[in-house]
Image (cartoon, rainbow, N blue to C red):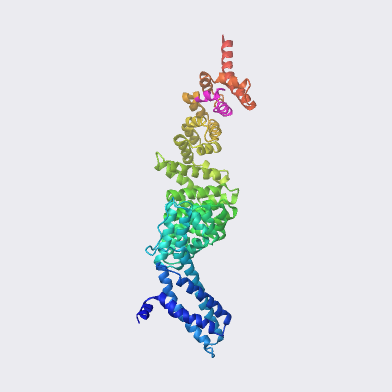
Amino acid sequence: MTNVAEDDADPLAIILHRLLPLLLAAALSVKTFVSRWRLVHSNLLRLQSLLSGSSCCHPLFVCLVRSLVPELSGLLSLSRRCLDPSLPDGKLHLQSDLDIASSTLALRLHDLGLLLLHSTSASSAIVLPVPSPSASRADVVLFVRDAFARLQIGGLDLKLDALQSLQDLLNSGAAAAAEIVAGEGATTAAVLRLLDHPVLRDRAAALTASLAAASAASRRAVFDEGGLGPLLRLLDPSLAAPAAARDRAAAAVAAFAADPASAWGVAAYGGVPILVAACRGDGSVSPSARALAAAALRNLAAADDARAAMVEEGAVPTLADLVVSGTPDARRNAALCLLSLASAADDRIRSTLIQESALQRLLQSLVHDNSHNSSSSSSDQELQEIVLKAIQALSPHPACSRILRSSPQFFAQLADLVRRSGSVTAAALLGDLSPDDDAANRSLALCMSALVRMMESSKPPTAQETAARALARLLSVKSNRRELARDEKSVMRLVQMLDPRNEDVAKRFPVSVVLAMTAGGGSGARKRLTEAGACQALQKLAAGGSDGDVAAGARKALQRISGNRFRSLFSIGWSN
């Protein structure tokens, strides 16, 4: 009786000493569905072997053995029905029940084999400790496989622990951890299946996002296992999802969009309208998720089809609003996306940007940043540059050009940016556009000294040419020529740049500025240049040894400067 009592209390004993002997005998006795029962008999023998040779006390093992008791009891009852010559419930019904029972037994065998092979035999630990960054690859593989076993056959708590353990592994920076997790393809698939679980999806989304962002290999594994679709559903504002899971999904989708190998899939899975809706936000999308959605759109905008889809889905006004109302990251990403759209060789998209107020929002952002940042941070200056480049990309469009030329405030902002931060993009716009208002043209003289200094800069490579072109346009106004001539420091800088020994500045740029200064017949600029020694430098450039265009420009500038002086001397001689 003692043994019976122990058997009743021990599921493993019940299986080994009661159920399996009866089932093994019955499986050989049944004459109906013989081939199916032979397969069952084979699996029962394997089960007996696994259980008899196991000393595992792992919590999962106990749960699995306990669940086997009612399933094996049901299989025993089914064998008795098959032994009945009358075949109760009919042959087809019995066959269906036997197939289900056989599949369940095979699944339990798979789970048991997986547990005994990959789980730890340490009975005291619920989870293996997270390997340190210096752990061997073998230790990390063992840890990942143990976590996978828990994801497969563990209860809810163990699944939560397994997900957190894998997340901790990735966060710890263990060597090649993401690649190892991704390399265990079944592990990635098991995690992705949990994205639809009401309790587990938050941690599953966090782990998936980490895998997507960790490396190209792990991102590819998630993509190949079909992880993008569930992540997009989590991000979709029209579907209910926890805020944390939505944030994680946004991070993962942004990582996919940044990778050319998977970016096409974001659009192909219908991601553009979801990302636009996430950028728009409706209270269920956090500011960080909006910023990440804008980043994803920014990367997708490199493709023609994606750009067309964005315009069709109403991305332009959404991104335009985000430029002025979002977080710093959201504003930056939205501005970059608008820049990409504006840079496309498609006048229809540019027209849409202008018609749907993107240009106005960009100008508004520029004014806002300048008025609130007397000493801008590097991130503020970066955003200003992005906004300026987006405006510059739109500026060739006739409608945009008209709007910009009629805005004295815009040109004042450009001049201020040139003076305050040395913005090459602002200087380029000054070289491309002229305000319609004469007073606005005169007010731009305040930035000419900064443009002269920019001509001395070798970085970026376009700085010298851009500054010279902007100066040439500003010097087309007579009052600006007088203003620059009065600036002794700027005149001296120009003359020093003309010196052939100064190899840091391409000579065609200062020569073009001197030509612009001496145009129009005024004598003030000529006098200042002569006093500063410009004639000697120009003579050396005109004498040869330099580019033909430079020599020709130097001779022309020298003629303008010296010709006026010779005419003055000639008139004095005649008067005597």
> What is the quadrant of residue 379 in the picture?
top left
Quadrant of image for the N terminus: bottom left
Tell me the residue at 51%/78% (across/down): 101
Furthest residue in direction top, as rendered: 576
Between 103 and 364, the one lying in front of the other is 103
Between 336 and 556, the one lying in front of the other is 336
Residue 145 visible (yes or no): yes
Between 364 and 226, the one lying in front of the other is 226
Prevailing SS of the magenta stretch: helix
Quadrant of image for the C terminus: top right
Furthest residue in direction right, as rendered: 548
Name the spot of residue 119 as percent of width and height, x first: 44, 64
Whether residue 277 is situated above or below residue 98 in the rendered picture: above
Residue 239 visible (yes or no): no
Magenta region includes residue 494: yes
Name the spot of residue 89 as percent of width and height, x first: 52, 87
Name the spot of residue 160 as percent of width and height, x first: 41, 63
Tell me the residue at 46%/44% (across/down): 383
Furthest residue in direction bottom, as rendered: 86
Magenta region includes residue 347: no
- Looking at the rendered structure, the number of numbered marks drawn on it comes to 0
Whether residue 163 is situated above or below residue 485 in the rendered picture: below
Name the spot of residue 128 as percent of width and height, x first: 41, 60
Whether residue 48 is situated above or below residue 235 in the rendered picture: below
Tell me where the magenta segment starts and ends, as one range: 493-516
